[in-house]
Image (cartoon, rainbow, N blue to C red):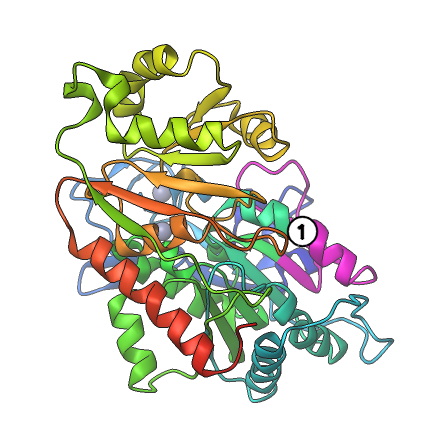
Amino acid sequence: MDETIFYGRHLLRSEYTGEWDEEEEAMRLIVTEGFNKENSQLTCNRCGTLCTMTVSYPCVCQNRCKYCRQCIKLGKITECSHLYSLEEPNQFPKYAYPYLKWTGTLSKQQAQASKDIRESIDHNSDRMIWAVAGAGKTEMLFEGVGQALEEGKRVCLATPRVDVALELAPRLIKAFPEVSLAVLYGGTEVPYQYTQLVISTTHQLYRFKEAFDVLIIDEVDAFPYYLNDALYFASEKARKIVSSVIYLTATPDKSMQKRIKRREIEASILPARYHGRPLPVPVGIWVKKSILKTKQNDTHIIIRHMKRLIEEGKQFLLFIPTISLMEQLMPIFEHSFKQSTFEWVHSQDPHRKEKVKKMREGGLQFLMTTTILERGVTFPNIDVIVMNADHRVFTEAALVQIAGRVGRAPDYPSGEVTYYHEVWTRAMKNAIKQIKNMNAVAARSGYLV
Ligand SMILES: [Zn+2]
Ligand SMILES: [Zn+2]
């Protein structure tokens, strides 16, 4: 049996495909029950979810068993399942060579954050990094990660989205070319291997147990509130007892902002972008009637706005809250923008990658999108229009992220962000307040050029 597969892991029997001798493995591996049973209540030991099943189902064990619905995508855990694990031995070279090969320069605030991160990793303590979109958060992790790797520590960078994991991988390989690295996500074809550096979707963290000396969790704000407990369980299980967790966010929610203010968690705030120009502040514009209800569509304020941008040769993203609204608008746009090139993308669109690429290369004048492009994607020089910004999908965090798409590149550090709305929502108000606040902090700290 290949023991390395079990180092710091938490696996079902079915997840190991090599040779298996039940008696021998039981002696060699740490074996725990799939469920924790207490007062006739079942809690899944892999994902921490309380089992609410009232009936049992016929099972491979010939009896009837309950199973965990929450983490079933990783393989079914039933009452008769076991989880297998081995202690993480950190079988990595120590101080072999300088690991970090990145030669870029950090901005003043990045350098400060990088120092904070190194200290937290050194002290095995936790830290929140609150960095505006475009601050350059990946680069500020490099020194801390490099230092940890040199000390023989095992490091994981977890993110909720596969797209982001895949985008991060080549950047980390380039920065740490000599370090073994695995990229883990649902549906990958590459078999798991024991590596010192791991890039993982947060979901895959369930498969780890006390594995990481350093765990970096990206986009902690991207989780819907009800998923926060599950994420917390997964990260607490995946980190070692003595370890450091670094949380990254561009838009912490209210409760997180309070924790930072009360100093319940150590935090580094990065209010400025790498290029040192302030964040574009969104403008709210009231709309009397939706385009769908306007007879002479071409006179509608949003269509006029779009036509102006096209005349100016400015590319833009048009955020639309739902796929169905997008579908209803399509014939109107096809009529109004006959001469223009545009596309639409949403989460179920199989061609979304090509369309985003086409937009980035300048092949489209505008791109209609649902909130899927609210984060992670960078276009060099665009404006943003949000239609029905008062819709409930546009939370404070979403609106801040959407505004963060604009003015990213040093050559084009500004742009317009417009929230069209019929009702002025608290989310819009707070988003604008948050952005203005960050600009003010950046100016006070001397980070703006
Ligand atoms: Zn579970
Ligand atoms: Zn069973």
Q: Is residue 227 left or right of residue 10?
A: left
Residue type at mark 1 is Ala
Residue at 56% across, 89% down:
123
- The image shows residue 350, relative to residue 51, as above or below, that is above
Q: Where ligand 2 lies, by quadrant? A: top left
Q: Nearer the viewer, residue 449 or 391?
A: 449
Task: Place residue 320 in its image quadrant.
Answer: top left
**Quarter of the figure that contains the C terminus:** bottom right
Which residue does the numbered mark 1 point to in the structure image?
Answer: 169
Please say whether residue 178 is one of the residues in the magenta stretch. Answer: yes
- The image shows residue 345, relative to residue 387, as above or below, that is above
Number of numbered callouts drawn: 1
Start and end of the magenta stretch?
Answer: 170-198
Q: Is ligand 1 less than 8 Å from the beta carbon at label 1?
A: no
Q: Nearer the viewer, residue 348 or 199?
A: 348
Residue at 46% across, 56% down:
206
Q: At which x and y percent is residue 443?
A: 45, 77
